[in-house]
Image (spheres, helix red, strand yellow):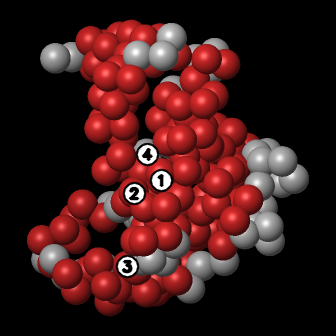
Amino acid sequence: MTFGDAAATERRLVALAAGGDRAAFAALVQAHQGYLRKLLGRICRGDQGRADDLAQEAFLRAWRALPGFRGEARFRTWLTRLAYSALSAERPGLPSADDAEALPDAEAHLSHGADWHIDLDRALATLSEAQRHAVLLCYGADLSHAEAAQVLGWPLGTVKTQVLRAKARLREQLQAWENTP
């Protein structure tokens, strides 16, 4: 299946689910739940129970809101936005849209296994919330800067700035990994 076929299949599933087809919605959940749970797990700093609750809330919101989904964004972007809204509702101090692996070269370090992931999680914990959210959406969720800005409800320039600052901080924190084979 090509990317075009996958996108067409997803659009068809979204249309069917918007019309009340539970099997189509179940297929969308199956396709996106791993991604969403992993992203929320990182945002929630490893609290997988909380991440699972937020993912469930996001899918519930998606089911209710699907008839109004216009398809102006990718389904994944829209779903991420719903998850972020659930997180913002839970923690009012977070920047929200109503008011306001993590390094691009992380693949090079996958052979290092658990040690790399432990250090990466520790480095992510040193970021400000804004930096962590921006970098996880852009690299962890594979959203473009524009899509991340849409999810966060921030200006595009703010997302770009937060990502640049996060990358600089992560490079500093993970410097020991820089020259490892």
| Residue type, label 4 | Asp
Question: Going from the N terminus, do you reach mark 2 or mark 4 first?
Answer: 2
Q: Counting other residues with Cα less than 10 Å from the Cα at mark 2, is it few (<14), some (14-19), or many (20 or more)?
A: many
Q: Can residue 161 be seen?
A: no
Classify 6 as above or below 90. Answer: above
The residue pinned by badge 2 equals 37
Q: Counting other residues with Cα less than 10 Å from the Cα at mark 1, is it few (<14), some (14-19), or many (20 or more)?
A: many
Q: Counting other residues with Cα less than 10 Å from the Cα at mark 3, is it few (<14), some (14-19), or many (20 or more)?
A: some
Assign the N terminus to one quadrant of the image: top left
Question: Going from the N terminus, do you reach mark 1 or mark 4 first?
Answer: 1
Q: Are marks 2 and 1 in contact (CB under 8 Å)?
A: yes
Q: Are marks 3 and 4 in contact (CB under 8 Å)?
A: no
Q: Which numbered dot is residue 55?
A: 1
| Residue type, label 1 | Ala
The residue pinned by badge 3 equals 120
Question: Going from the N terminus, do you reach mark 3 or mark 1 first?
Answer: 1
Q: CA distance from mark 2 to mark 1?
A: 6 Å
Q: Counting other residues with Cα less than 10 Å from the Cα at mark 4, is it few (<14), some (14-19), or many (20 or more)?
A: some
Q: CA distance from mark 3 to mark 4?
A: 17 Å
Q: Are marks 3 and 1 in contact (CB under 8 Å)?
A: no
Q: Residue at x 66, y 77 (%)?
A: 128
Dot 1 lies on which element? helix
The residue pinned by badge 4 equals 142
149 and 178: which is toward the camera: 149
Question: Going from the N terminus, do you reach mark 2 or mark 1 first?
Answer: 2
Dot 3 lies on which element? helix
